[in-house]
Image (tube, grey):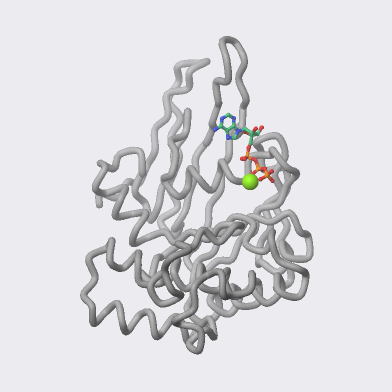
Amino acid sequence: MRKEKKYKKQEMTSQETIDHELDPNAIIQTIDLAKIYHITEGVEIRALNGINIDIKKGEFVSVMGPSGSGKTTLLNMIGALDNPTTGAVFISGTNIAHMNDTERTNLRLNEIGFIFQFYNLVPVLSTYENIELPMIFAGKSKEVRNRNVKKFLDIVSLSEKADHLPSELSGGEQQRVAIARALCNEPSILIADEPTGELDTVKGMEIIRLLRELNLELNQTILMVTHDPAVGTLAERMLKMRDGKIIETVITKN
Ligand SMILES: Nc1ncnc2c1ncn2[C@@H]1O[C@H](COP(=O)(O)OP(=O)(O)OP(=O)(O)O)[C@@H](O)[C@H]1O
Ligand SMILES: [Mg+2]
């Protein structure tokens, strides 16, 4: 992938060109990221309104903000699930807008692992098979798949439940399967959208502690959205969003 050192943006109002120095240490960098949804003729929603964030390898960053403030939209842009209206997202120095379809698919499969609020496990597949699935898509050999499934089953403490179907697991266990699945291709970034949203406080905290362990022990970069301040402050840095903007950055003591 071609790395870029500078990002030039044509400023629509003044027609002047603004140069943004790219941070060579950033694993995620967004520049003036904006997303406008056109609902009907003349009605638009500015879901993101000029987001500039810079996340380094090994950081654990949380995003908090009221419903509708743009948190999921931001994750979707960073995870290449959707395209910004203006601005840019750089992953490890590469502008994802410049990637072709194959490169974007590879990015989503190999560089970014997703965890969602509702786990999104395949109901007819066992724990083992759910974790194995992204590695099949990524073309990994049977041997590598087997090794990685066992490794991540052990990390999320579910080796005993490898043969269970999702319906035979608790919510917290299902989320741990989803975490193992997100990690099995050893992505450089783990993106989590409300990973504790469906869990009670105790089970939710277990998930956050697991994410923090992965962050510290594997130097896993994590970007996590949450509604819960107790969860948000467990990250090293908390970005507070409102109306499509980052209104405050809080460095926590973690
Ligand atoms: N596909 C879409 N089409 C139109 N509007 C959308 C779409 N997706 C999101 N929006 C709007 O964009 C804004 C931001 O939505 P987003 O889902 O990012 O919020 P959020 O912060 O994740 O909220 P929540 O905490 O409820 O999950 C909202 O006003 C939402 O209605
Ligand atoms: Mg959301």
Front residue of 208/215: it is: 208
Work out which quarter of the rendered image holds the C terminus and state it.
bottom right
Instruction: In the displayed orientation, state which residue is furthest to the top.
Output: 41
Give the left or right position of residue 189, taking residue 105 as reference: right
Give the x, y percent position of residue 107. 34, 54
Residue 21: image quadrant is top left
Count the marks: how many? 0
Please give the name of the residue rendered at 49% of the width and 63% of the height, measured from the top-left corner. Answer: 121
Please tell me whether residue 173 is drawn above or below residue 227 in the rendered image: below
Front residue of 177/17: it is: 177
Q: Quadrant of ligand 1?
A: top right
Please give the name of the residue rendered at 70% of the width and 52% of the height, measured from the top-left corner. Answer: 64
Give the x, y percent position of residue 167. 56, 69
Please tell me whether residue 71 is drawn above or below residue 154 in the rendered image: above
Give the x, y percent position of residue 125. 41, 68
Please tell me whether residue 16 is drawn above or below residue 106 in the rendered image: above
Front residue of 241/227: it is: 227
Please give the name of the residue rendered at 33% of the width and 62% of the height, measured from the top-left corner. Answer: 110
Please give the name of the residue rendered at 78% of the width and 65% of the height, measured from the top-left corner. Answer: 230
Residue 250: image quadrant is bottom right
Give the x, y percent position of residue 219. 49, 75
Give the left or right position of residue 80, taking residue 224 as reference: left
